[in-house]
Structures are given as C-alpha cells and as structure tokens.
Image: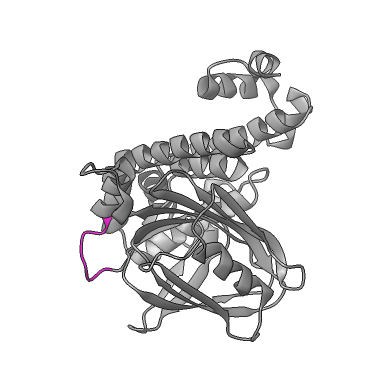
Amino acid sequence: MNVHKSNWYEIKNLQITSCPLTNGLNDLYREQPAQLQRLQVPEQIGQGYWERIRVNSFLELLICDMSFHKYTQMSSREQDNSIKWSFCLGDSVDWREEASGRTYELKAGEMSVFGHKPTLALGQYHAGSHIQGITVKMDSSRLPGDQLHPVSQVVMGSMDSADKPFLKHLVTPAMKRILIDIMRCDYEEKLKRIYLEGKVLELTAVCMHESKKGLSAFSKMSQPDIDSLLLAKEILDRDLLSAPSLSQLSRQICLNEFKLKKGFKQLFGLSVHAYIIECRLEAAYHLLETTRMNITTAASMCGFNNPSYFAEKFRQKYGAAPSHYFRNLR
C-alpha cells in the first residue's frame, strides 16, 4: 500500500551507506500500518527489536527495546500529521535538531511531547547502551468526527505553544507501572490491541491526574536539583535489593536529605521508601505471574525477607494475599 502523501520518513545510518537496520526501519515506518509489525535488529548491528502496533484508526504505539554493538549515528527526517508522546525507560538518548541546532536529551524516567512539524534530527547511540522506550503516536487528521479523544486532549494540552516543538516532563511511578505493563503484554492479535488501547487510556488518565502536582513541582525546582533527583531514582532502579539508605543516597547525589525527601515525593508521588517497596512488589508480582516460583522465594529475591510483611504489602496493593491471588490466577 502506498504511503499517504502527508507522511514521509527517511532514516539513515551516517556511518554505513547501506544499513540493514535503517532499511528495515524505513520499511516499518513508511508502510501503512498493519495491526502489528515487528522488526528484529540485525545481529551485525545489535540486539533487540522495534515494534509498531496499530491500536485503532488514529492511535499507534511504537516500542523500542534494543542496544547497538558499537557507537552509531543516525539521521531521521520525518513529516506526518501525528503528535508524539514518548517515554524513556532505558539509558539516556540525545539528538540534535538540524534546523535550529538545538540539542535535546531525554533521560531515563522522563517523557517528551513533540509536534507534527517536519523535522530532521541527528541522534547518537553509544555501544552497549540500552535503548528502551514507548511512544504514543496520535494522528490528528484521523480523529473521528469533532470529538477530541482523551489522549489527544492531554497531548494537545501539553503543546501549549507553537514555538516549543519539544516539551519534557517526568515519568511518575504510576506512569511507569503502566508502561511496564505495555512492554510485558503477551496477548496476541485482537486481544493485544484491546488491552493496549485500555492501557493508553489508563496512561492518559494518570497523566491528567498527576500533571497538576508533579509537573507543577517540576517547574518550581532548579535544574540541578531535578537532575539529582532523577539520579536518585536511577540509583534505586538499578539495585532495588540493596538500596542505599537516605543518608547514603543523599551523599551519592550531592543533595541534602531534606531536599531529597521532599523533592522525591513531589516529583514522583511517593517517598523514597514507598517507591522502593512499590518497585519490589511489582518485581515479585512479575516473577509469580510468569514462573512457577513459590511465594517465599520470589519475595526474598525481590528484597522481602519477612514473608508476613510481604503478604501484608501485597494485600494492600493487589487486594488479596499472594497465596490466594495466584492460586485463583493459576
């Protein structure tokens, strides 16, 4: 099927004339979307995949989970009717917009919103970096009737100024939980699209709810403090089993304990301790859902050495004791 005239993509590897990865990406992005398209990264380039999922007539999900074997530079020229809402879950990525010369960086735990103006961007990717992210892509020209879809309300609301082609906000723990659900979805065909559309709507609701508190706090803090708090979250995510104490974490990020405690809760909606417990619970849930591991072992592997404490926290979060919950599930 031919590419719509208003949609145009060209991705190039600046170091390799004929690159199997960029050739595959051009095919993936240019073709009219099937319900599900997946590109496996060629072995000589790296490992992982790109996935393009058509959720409905005007919503798409783009999922990337890959790494390069060596330092790579790519250019991306893009024009379409879509507004993109991107979430960085892996290592930081940075690129330069050719027209303005502006350089952008998106760190783990941040989201960006950018519009449908034609762009030419130059990106660089370091060897071994884990590139992982999700983009919600909304084609405004295909919205049904005059009604504004809830996703578009949030995205369009974020694009509050035509002279701001790229806006950046924080990903809160509640958003991250939904994004992980999207990454781990193992349904197929129609069930997968139904599930993912529901997750996009859930993500929209969470963003609308948390934008007032989190994004307002984001705007009131200095950039060095924000960078320190993002680093704190990155340190915790890296090693939840042996998470540092507040005083240790404070020293590692060069921010006093008061600012760490207050700022972390303002930006991410949870205290440092509550965030650690939340992430450990989700890790244990994933183990119990996807393996036959017994509950005590799974809890211990995720940092819960007291089975009773784990059962209490699990019940508070999921509404039932883990033994009852997973017995019924299985």
Q: Is residue 249 above or below residue 326?
A: below
Q: Percent x, y for residue 186?
A: 64, 38
Quarter holding residue 242: top right
Q: Which residues are magenta?
A: 158-164
Q: Residue at x 54, y 47 (%)?
A: 35
Left or right side of 111 for 167:
left
Left or right side of 142 for 104:
right
Q: Is residue 295 above or below residue 45?
A: above
User: Which secondary structure is most common in the magenta stretch?
Assistant: loop
Q: Is residue 311 above or below residue 165?
A: above
Q: Residue at x 60, y 32 (%)?
A: 281
Residue 83 in view, yes or no: yes
Residue 145 is one of the magenta-drawn residues: no
Outermost front residue: 1
Left or right side of 312 for 302:
right
Q: Percent x, y for residue 107?
A: 49, 63
Q: Residue at x 29, y 43 (%)?
A: 144
Q: Percent x, y for residue 309?
A: 62, 22
Q: Nearer the viewer, residue 3 or 200?
A: 3
Colouring rule applied to residues: one colour
Q: Is residue 39 above or below residue 57?
A: below
Q: Nearer the viewer, residue 249 or 141?
A: 141
Q: Percent x, y for residue 262?
A: 37, 46
Q: Quadrant of the C terminus?
A: top right
Residue 277 in view, yes or no: no
Left or right side of 276 for 289:
right
Q: How many marks?
A: 0
